């Protein structure tokens, strides 16, 4: 009987440790090259990649694009999704309503300045799911030396 209980205990231990083995924290994601040159973050069971415009100026609308994939990098449809990107740059706060723009992309416009201290909070609600949120620091240099891309 001891081998059975030992096997059962090992199975339970592996099952409870599995989620942390597959989780990607911000430090890990900052070491990964994002497919579209942006910054990657976890958003529940998804990955969001934020791409902001590097030469954005406060006097004009600039694009904010979020790509949505699963943990394996497979595109997730954004058809019917809604979302927002709240941008904090210095003392300026702006919000970009996000709308589907392609298979797995959300896009909006906002007035912001791309700066090192810039922070962006993205919230997206896919049809039939609860909203998922991610926090970005697109102006910071990632560990591989790349900056957030712009399109």
Image (tube, helix red, strand yellow):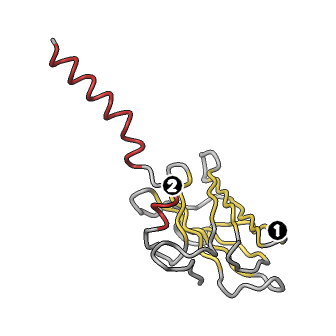
Q: Position of residue 128 (x, y in %)?
A: 60, 46
Residue at image mark 1: 93
Is 147 in front, or is 74? 147
10 Å crowding of disc 2: few (<14), some (14-19), many (20+): many
Label 2, secondary structure: give it.
Answer: strand
Q: Of all residues shown, which one is farthest toward the bottom? A: 55
Image: 129 above or below 65: above
Image: 79 above or below 60: above
Mark 1 and mark 2: Cα distance apart in space: 26 Å
Residue at (34% x, 34% y) in the render: 15
Q: Is residue 85 left or right of residue 136?
A: right
Q: Quadrant of the N terminus?
A: top left
Q: Which picture quadrant has residue 9?
A: top left
Image: 27 above or below 138: above
Q: Position of residue 46 (x, y in %)?
A: 51, 55
Residue at (64% x, 75% y) in the render: 139
Residue at image mark 2: 46
Q: Position of residue 85 (x, y in %)?
A: 71, 65
Label 1, secondary structure: give it.
Answer: strand
Is 95 in front, or is 54? 54
Q: Quadrant of the C terminus?
A: bottom right
Q: Are marks 1 and 2 in contact (CB under 8 Å)?
A: no
* Marks 1 and 2, the one that precedes in the sequence: 2
Q: Position of residue 109 (x, y in %)?
A: 74, 76
Q: Which picture quadrant has residue 111?
A: bottom right
Q: Is residue 13 left or right of residue 97?
A: left
């Amino acid at each position: 009987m001891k081998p059975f209980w030992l096997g059962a205990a090992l199975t339970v231990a592996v099952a409870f440790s599995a989620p942390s083995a597959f989780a990607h924290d911000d430090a890990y994601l900052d070491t990964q090259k994002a497919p579209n040159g942006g910054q990657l973050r976890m958003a529940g069971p998804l990955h969001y990649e934020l791409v902001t415009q590097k030469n954005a100026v406060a006097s004009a609308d600039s694009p904010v694009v979020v790509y949505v994939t699963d943990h394996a990098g497979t595109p997730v449809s954004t058809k019917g999704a809604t979302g927002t990107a709240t941008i904090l740059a210095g003392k300026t706060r702006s919000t970009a309503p996000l709308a589907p723009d392609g298979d797995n992309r959300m896009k909006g416009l906002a007035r912001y300045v791309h700066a090192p201290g810039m922070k962006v909070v993205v919230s997206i609600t896919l049809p039939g799911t609860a909203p998922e949120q991610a926090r970005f620091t697109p102006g910071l240099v990632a560990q591989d030396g790349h900056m957030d891309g712009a399109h």
